[in-house]
Amino acid sequence: MSGERETESLPAPRLLPLAARRSPLAWIPPALCALVALACDGKRAVVHTAPKPHAEEVSFTAIESPSLQFLPRQQEAAPWRLDEDPIVIPGDRLANYLDQDAARFQQYGALDLTAGKYTSLDGKGFATVEIFRFPDFVKAFGAYSMRKAPNITYLTLQNESFATAHTIHIWRGPFYVRLTGRGEGNTLVRLASFVADRMPVAPGRPGVFGFFPDKQRIPNSERYAADSGFGQKYLGNSFQAQFDVDNDIIDGLIIPTANKQTATQILNAYRSLYVANGKLLDTIPNLGEDNFTGEDKYLGRAVAFRIDRFVIAFNGYKERQHLVDLATTTDQRILGNIRKQLVTADRQSEEGANEPRRTNPPAWPRPRP
């Protein structure tokens, strides 16, 4: 046709069936499909994966600890016999042995736990001796003190000890010993005494308790709580004691902080608790560097103050004046301690200033001739 290019007539494309168009195997020659099927033998290919590494197994009987020397071996503490090799659990693995209770011991920085199982020679008694080791005697006292409960019997084992129906608890230097079991007569106490007598003794309770008034303090009520005080987390790491003032039971705490700024923040947080839930009362003249008093139906009455880097608080539910008296006495005791430290520092400074200077240098820096 004139004026138009002639185009070659192309055949129309052949459409494949719908199933073939959707399957990529439709384009594979049938002979090749037969070979693939023969090779697979009609089974799926097996994929091999690398096995997961097993958790490292630890032999707790092979771990060493200074506490091992305190456990009686063989039949040293008659009538008790060591059943098997003692175990030592490192501090970061306490959950393997104590489950949820491990967190409490870790709050006090437990280094390890050494445990030995014993049976009496007559086969009627059994006991487990657990020795928790801590970095210092203050933390050991804390872990021990938080086990105190009503209706316990205090023993004479140093530094301090008590017993319940089937357990004996001992604070001894940087160690807390817990003995659980059943025995005839006082055999459990004798076993506990054998262990404790081998341990070093602490010089006494943590010195912070010396700031509390001695009068009206309930004997053996002292605790060191790492987690909280008066139910508040920010009052943790506190040294606590109870007082009985004319049948008015009062709780007291002292928190030694790193500096004045931290102490101020803690006191303000405690004050805010009463602002939000109760009401504030008049402050007390000349008590610490800052103080407040408050009351609430559920929180009770509180008198709290800050002096230097210390936060002190007393909590009760009866007479406010009882709290004020305890706070005032504590304030004076801390002030007296601070004055004593200042006087000692001044004396040492004066002695250093009056010391005659050496005219001859010591032998070691002299040059050789």
Image: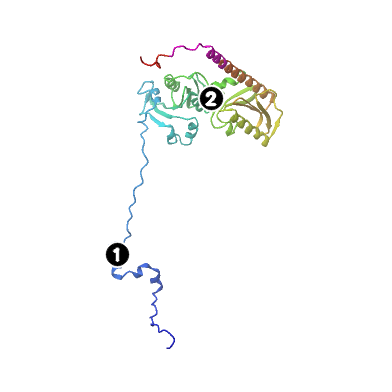
User: Residue 26: horizontal and vertical position, in percent?
Assistant: 35, 70
Quadrant hosting residue 63 = top left
From this viewpoint, is residue 298 visible? no
Q: Which element is circle 1 on?
A: helix
Q: Position of residue 112 (x, y in %)?
A: 43, 30
Circle 1 residues within 10 Å: few <14, some 14–19, many ≥20: few
Q: Nearer the viewer, mark 1 or mark 2?
A: 1
Of all residues, the one furthest to the bottom in this rendering is 1
Which residue matches tag 2?
A: 152
Q: Which residue is rendered at x = 41% and y = 72% of the image? A: 18
Q: Position of residue 369 (x, y in %)?
A: 35, 14
Q: Quadrant of residue 350?
A: top right
Residue 351 lies in the magenta-colored region: yes
Tag of residue 36: 1
- Dot 2 falls on a residue whose secondary structure is loop
363 vs 351, nearest the viewer: 363
Q: Amino acid at mark 1?
A: Val
Q: Residue 254: where, in percent of width, then height? A: 59, 26
Q: Residues within 10 Å of mark 2 (few under 14, many from 20)?
A: few
On-image quarter of the N terminus? bottom left
